[in-house]
Amino acid sequence: MPAPVAPHVPAPDRESGRKPWSWRRAGAGVAALVVAAVCAGSAAGAGAGTAVPGGAFGVDATRCGAPGSRLPAGRLAFTVTDRATPYATVYLTSPDGAEVYAEIPWIAPGRTVALNTALSAGSYAFRCVFSDGTVRTSRPLAVTGRTDDAVAGYRPVPDLAMTAPVNAYRAWVAAALPGLLTAAHALDTAVAHGDLAAARSRWLSAHLAYERLGAAYTAFGDFDDAIDGRADGLPQGVDSPDWTGFHRIEYDLWHGHSAADLRPLTTRLVSDVAGLIRDFPSEDVDPGDLPLRSHEILENAMQFQLTGAADYGSGTTLATLDANLDGTREVLGVLTPLLRPRDPRLASSLTREVSAVQARVRSCRSANGTWAPVRQLTLNQSRSLEGDLGGLLEQLAEVPGLLAPRTSA
């Protein structure tokens, strides 16, 4: 299994009013970040827990240096200095570049960084990718001997390989947005007619249509706060006059407010969704976001839906969790062509587990379509759902490391 590309920093919840976090390559302030596959235990010829110095070498715009031509198998410690003007990414690869065994994602000019790994016998090379687009490969590095410590190589994902999944996901979101607008109009119409019973049913349909778009919220900008923001962190909480969107409507619908109180909110919702549809073609989906969101959609669901923290009166957070699972399935669907060749076991397991967890969530829905509020679940039911979702999240956590895009990887 590959080492992850960068330490995972959880995104601030999109419903809290804070901007969601988006991964970018580190700049000079964290230029010493090293991500290398390091195995514990003894390595042949190295002594227990000891790495053999692999040597020091420099990289610059004209060459990608190598520390030597022959090293013993086992744990190796290299020292890399960027002597070029551009920033550099350094990979230790198989000779054809198809497999990576260690990497420095970003090293600043003039900086020296350690790169540690454990290699079996074979031929390797260093590949240096500079921020100006220059790519250099070192002379071959031969490793001889035996070791039980060697890391498995992994196939990095070039930036351009994410183009097709991103385009496919954008197309899916664009096709789903008109249905969201139709559902928002239906909610507004029910409120305009004073039919609050119908409004409650239509609110849920519209809200779930939005929640299925979970991986796209980083491309929605301020529209996400307006459409689905929570009251958490607002100066006056649920009494904040600027609080709008689905959760504000939910609060008012289930706390005895009149249709006259609700109508400005549902009209605003329709306007905001229409604005989102107009704006979406101009917004970008960061290629690094999709692998992260495949995990974070349900990470947020675990925190806010399964606990009931996002319930403002409707008792439908399990329905939202179900919609989030739909959204996760869509993200995995576009990522599977990249995921399957890198870890076919994980790709197949995720397909099965998403369906299995969703079936268990849907067992909390009655025959007439109503959902059990999480507060009405038994302790055993709550623990079972939490365990199922936690197990799925453990598997999903592997996806960002496998599929994080690398420049000229």
Image (cartoon, rainbow, N blue to C red):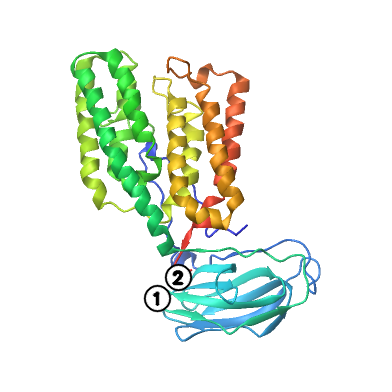
Please state the horizontal and vertical placement of residue 324, each as a whole percent of the image: 44, 35
Q: Which residue is the site of mark 2? A: 408
Counting from the top left corner in percent of width and height, residue 141 is at 64, 81
Other residues around mark 1 within 10 Å, as few (<14) / some (14–19) / many (≥20): few
Q: Residue at x 37, y 30 (%)?
A: 208
Figure quadrant of the N terminus: bottom right
Q: Marks 2 and 1: CB-CB under 8 Å?
A: yes
27 vs 294, nearest the viewer? 294
N-terminal label among 2 and 1: 1
At which x and y percent is residue 401? 54, 55
For the question of whether residue 41 can be seen, the reply is yes
Amino acid type indicated by mark 1: Gly
Placement of 193 over or under 188, stated as above or below:
above
What whole-number distance in Å separates the C-alpha atoms at marks 2 and 1?
8 Å
Q: Amino acid at mark 2?
A: Ser
Give 117 or 111, whichever is nearer the viewer: 117
In the image shown, does 69 or 375 lie closer to the viewer? Answer: 69
Say few, some or many: other residues with alpha carbon within 10 Å of mark 2 (under 14 / 14 to 19 / 20 or more): some
**Residue 223 in the image: above or below residue 99:** above
Residue 171: x %, y % from top left: 32, 48
Is residue 7 among the parts visible in the rendering? no
Residue 133's disc number? 1
Q: Is residue 236 above or below residue 252?
A: below
Q: What residue is shown at x 69% (from left), y 73% (from top)?
A: 76
Up/down of 296 relative to 366, above or below: below
Q: Is residue 110 left or right of residue 101?
A: left
Q: Residue at x 69, y 71 (%)?
A: 119
Question: What residue do we see at 61% from left, 71% from top?
Answer: 115
